[in-house]
Amino acid sequence: MNTFQAIIIAIIEGITEFLPVSSTGHMILASSFFGIEHDDFTKLFTIVIQLGAILSVVVLYFKRFFQSFDFYFKLLVAFIPAVVFGLLFSKKIDALLESPLTVAVSLLIGGIILLKVDDWFTNAEEVQTSNEISYAQALKIGLFQCLAMVPGVSRSGASIVGGMSQKLSRTSAAEFSFFLAVPTMLGATAKKCYDYYKDGLVLSHDQINFLIIGNLVAFIVALIAIKSFIGFLTKNGFKVFGYYRIIAGILLLAIHFFIHPLTII
């Protein structure tokens, strides 16, 4: 990895982390394009820089993020499924992180689902703020979030759809998804760093600089993306993201089967 590649991947992360299009999936495709997908540091980088993007939530929602302990307990309840499934299937998840074909299929299926989401939950808007979420609703949203362990499945998309299935409005579901991302990505970063050093790998001076640059770029870009996304989602819903995912998925599958195989494992 070089500085240019680190910046491009970080920009992709900042733009896509909070959009229901899968940031990890797009970063896998970018690293594949650069030919650095097999590198252990690349896998670490794509996880760790998500923390920079997630911290933009704390800045933008500073007053709302620091709420009552009851709200934090709900976040903890929603976070628990990711911990359980992450520990149980970490090896299989790492294998999938090298598969652009998995990303392509997930983009296509997820796109079809997003086209229907607004119709499915049109009359379900009862919970208008993230503070009103119950513990049971929080747990169910956390289970939906676990779907994003499959590359190409959007973490924000899965948790927002999960929230809407629990009678949250689009806006409140999106905001709770943002808040839930903080402990989720803190945990994912800690686990990935632990595994990296457990395998006997050590970060070089340049790699540390890439992580710093990546987190800063992802943070700045995500600040802009969050504000834009909330406004767009409230007015327009999910369909445009659904069409994007379907087109991207079809293009990738066409490339894989008719031009050049995408599978790199």
Image: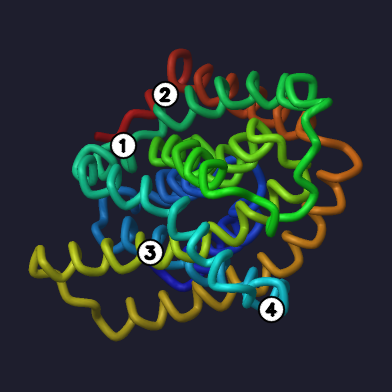
Callout 1–callout 3 Cβ contact below 8 Å: no
Q: Nearer the viewer, mark 2 or mark 4?
A: 4
Callout 1–callout 4 Cβ contact below 8 Å: no
User: What is the x, y in percent for residue 48?
Assistant: 40, 66
Of pointers 1 and 3, the one earlier in the residue sequence: 3
Q: Point out the image quarter for the C terminus.
A: top left
The three-letter amino acid code for the residue at tag 1 is Leu
Of pointers 2 and 3, the one earlier in the residue sequence: 3
In the rendered image, which residue does mark 1 sit on?
A: 96
Of pointers 1 and 4, the one earlier in the residue sequence: 4
In the rendered image, which residue does mark 3 sit on?
A: 45
User: What is the x, y in percent for residue 195?
Assistant: 18, 62
- Marks 2 and 3 sit apart, C-alpha to C-alpha, by 26 Å
The three-letter amino acid code for the residue at tag 2 is His
Q: Residue at x 62, y 29 (%)?
A: 248
The three-letter amino acid code for the residue at tag 4 is Phe
- Marks 3 and 4 sit apart, C-alpha to C-alpha, by 26 Å
Q: Residue at x 49, y 27 (%)?
A: 106
Q: Nearer the viewer, mark 1 or mark 4?
A: 4
- Marks 2 and 4 sit apart, C-alpha to C-alpha, by 46 Å
User: What is the x, y in percent for residue 69?
Assistant: 54, 72
Q: Nearer the viewer, residue 42 or 113?
A: 113
* SS of the residue under disc 4: helix
